[in-house]
Image (spheres, rainbow, N blue to C red):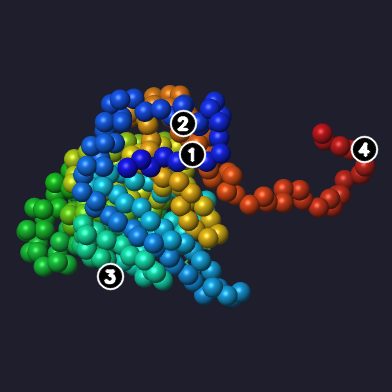
């Protein structure tokens, strides 16, 4: 299966396939990825909402697959349906048509096979770091001792061992999101859905969190669906990027990221990274409706007192 299709571009144009050519090692890595079982299958997913001027199609026949332990990013402009898609996969919303399957089983409502991390901090303020990570385990009937023993390695994995008994108000934004990741993973989901989880963080913390996420993902048997509108974030993290367009929300292309792993911060400077980013930009840019960019002239200064 090849997931790269080309949309109207010649060789040498920004992000052309030549510039994004995969090394043999990367090609082999994708071949191995596609050999893995399909963990998530989204098939013909449609979601319409009742708007004031009639029905609004938020998602229009979305279909893609993620393979076991793949890190799949979903990008697209605001309003293209990324959160709706994430919520439907999580079982927090129902599609108007189509289906979502996890390990071949159709999803109806939320389940322990899927975990979610949102942009906003969703920790319980009255629970400690460990208490937060234990929560799902206790809800599913584990004793306190059992839940504690099971939760602690996850707290350690996200680097918060020394903060296990701290409360959320004592943590930075990045630390809170690490707790949220540990809490979601402690339930051993098959799919981890992350909806712009780092969007509220400052640039430096965000880069740090991206690196942490990759380190965590390497160690866990989980398939990650990571929603973002940040192209650099998508190229840094993803095996493949599902590029969505808006009105209606649909898939423009599914792009294999040719940047080899492991990816360090320096990979941002690489030509492959740049070409991939440009390609994503081009896809999204071409889909964007031409906005009116000139404001009406309402003069508030005397003629002749020009600043340009
Ligand atoms: P994104 O996360 O990509 O910014 P969303 O999934 O939040 O996009 O929204 C996609 C579209 O669906 C938007 O046009 C939004 O206004 C509409 N939408 C989302 N949720 C609802 C809802 N509960 N009721 C009505 N319209 C909604
Ligand atoms: Mg959103």
Disc 1 from disc 2: Cα separation:
8 Å
Q: Badge 3: few (under 14), some or many (20 or more) residues near its Cα, within 10 Å? A: some
**Residue that numbered label 3 is attached to:** 108
Mark 4 against mark 3, which lies toward the viewer?
Answer: 3
Disc 4 from disc 3: Cα separation:
67 Å
**Residue that numbered label 1 is attached to:** 6
Q: Badge 1: few (under 14), some or many (20 or more) residues near its Cα, within 10 Å? A: few
Disc 4 from disc 2: Cα separation:
51 Å
Is residue 173 found left or right of 262 in the rendered image?
Answer: right
Report the disc number at residue 17: 2
Are the residues flagged by discs 1 and 2 in contact, CB closer than 8 Å? yes
Mark 3 against mark 2, which lies toward the viewer?
Answer: 2
**Along the polypeptide, which appears first: circle 1 or circle 2?**
1
Are the residues flagged by discs 3 and 2 in contact, CB closer than 8 Å? no
Residue 149 against residue 135 in the figure, above or below: above
Mark 4 against mark 2, which lies toward the viewer?
Answer: 2
Mark 1 against mark 4, which lies toward the viewer?
Answer: 1
Query: At 32% from the left edge and 54% from the top edge, which residue is drawn?
Result: 193
Question: Visible in this render: residue 222?
Answer: no
Residue 26 against residue 121 in the figure, above or below: above
Report the disc number at residue 304: 4
Element carrying mark 2: helix
**Along the polypeptide, which appears first: circle 4 or circle 2?**
2
Residue closer to the observer: 183 or 175: 183
Residue 25 lies in quadrant = top left
Query: At 84% from the left edge and 50% from the top edge, which residue is drawn?
Result: 297
């Amino acid at each position: 299966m090849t997931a790269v299709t080309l949309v109207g571009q010649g060789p040498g144009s920004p992000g052309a396939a030549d510039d994004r050519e995969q090394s043999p090692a990367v090609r082999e890595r994708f071949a191995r990825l596609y050999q893995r079982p399909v963990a998530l299958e989204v098939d013909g997913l449609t979601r319409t909402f009742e708007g004031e001027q009639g029905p609004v199609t938020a998602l229009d026949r979305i279909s893609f697959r993620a393979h076991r332990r793949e890190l799949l990013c979903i990008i697209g402009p605001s309003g293209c349906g990324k959160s709706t898609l994430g919520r439907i996969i999580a079982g927090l919303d129902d599609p108007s048509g189509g289906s979502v399957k996890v390990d071949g089983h159709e999803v109806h409502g939320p389940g322990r096979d899927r975990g979610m991390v949102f942009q906003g901090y969703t920790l319980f303020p009255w629970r400690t770091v460990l208490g937060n990570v234990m929560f799902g385990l206790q809800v599913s009937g584990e004793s306190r001792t059992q839940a504690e023993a099971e939760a602690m390695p996850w707290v350690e994995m996200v680097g918060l061992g020394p903060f296990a008994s701290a409360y959320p108000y004592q943590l930075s934004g990045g630390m809170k999101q690490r707790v949220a990741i540990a809490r979601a993973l402690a339930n051993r989901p098959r799919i981890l859905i992350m909806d712009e989880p780092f969007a509220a963080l400052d640039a430096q913390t965000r880069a740090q969190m991206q690196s942490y996420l990759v380190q965590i993902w390497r160690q866990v048997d989980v398939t990650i669906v990571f929603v973002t509108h940040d192209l650099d974030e998508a190229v840094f993290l993803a095996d493949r990027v599902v590029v969505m367009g808006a009105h209606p929300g649909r898939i423009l292309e599914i792009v294999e990221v040719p940047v080899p792993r492991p990816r360090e911060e320096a990979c941002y400077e690489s030509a492959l990274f740049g070409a991939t980013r440009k390609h994503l930009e081009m896809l999204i840019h071409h889909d964007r409706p031409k906005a009116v960019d000139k404001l009406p002239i309402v003069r508030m200064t005397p003629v002749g007192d020009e600043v340009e």
